[in-house]
Amino acid sequence: MTKTTTILILGLGNMLFSDDGIGVHLVNRLAKNNSQKKHLKFVDGGTVGLNLLTELDDTYGIIAIDAAEIDKPAGFIQIFEGLDMDTRLAAKKRTPHEVTLADLMSTAVLTGIRPDNRALVGIQPEDIDWGDKPTETLMKSMDKAESIILALADKWTAQHAPKYITQELH
């Protein structure tokens, strides 16, 4: 796929620390439930690294999903889109994934491949102690998070559609 047709959905987190792995659990669920949506590319980014830079190469959008300390009740979902994402990543880092996601996005800027459409979907964790699945509180927030992520991807796709159709006709 070309840069004009793909949105990267990137799940972040460590699945050995219960709620910390929510991004990975969600991206796996999204991939399973939405395999027919060929314009969406689902990637388990784990604890993220610069090796994910190549994943940005053919995208016009990225939605990163991660546990985030946002000083809200457990399971609260907050979207940081565009400049809000940049500001969040430039501020004091509250999780290790924000540090490496910030490095990834900074490198994408330097190499000229950072998508204009970008968002961080942060979910307030309840517990990040040892555990191979999210807490019940975060499990209950997964339906809402999935809807939010798909709605954002649909919004970007609709905004991008005229350009995509024009390019396909030539």
Image (cartoon, rainbow, N blue to C red):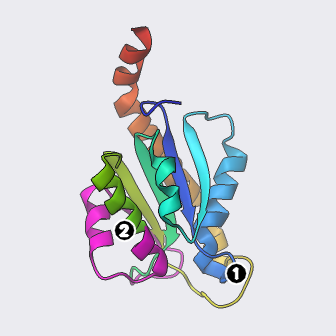
Under tag 1, what secondary structure? loop
Q: Is residue 146 magenta?
A: no
Of the pair 102 and 10, the residue shown nearer to us? 102
Residue 20 visible in the displayed image: yes
Of the pair 49 and 169, the residue shown nearer to us? 49
Residue 142 visible in the displayed image: no
**Disc 1 residue crowd, few under 14, some 14–19, many 20+, Cα 10 Å:** some
Callout 1 amino acid:
Leu
Q: Is residue 79 magenta?
A: yes
Q: Is residue 80 above or below residue 59?
A: below
Residue at horizontal 53 percent and vertical 67 percent from the top: 48
Measure the C-alpha gap from mark 2 to mark 1. Answer: 22 Å
Callout 2 amino acid:
Ala
Q: Position of residue 17 (x, y in %)?
A: 65, 83
Report the span colored magenta. 71-100
Of the pair 154 and 97, the residue shown nearer to us? 97
Q: Residue furthest bottom?
A: 129
Looking at the rendered structure, which numbered label has been put on residue 16?
A: 1
Residue at horizontal 37 percent and vertical 68 percent from the top: 102
Q: Position of residue 158 (x, y in %)?
A: 40, 31
Which residue bears the numbered disc 2? 102
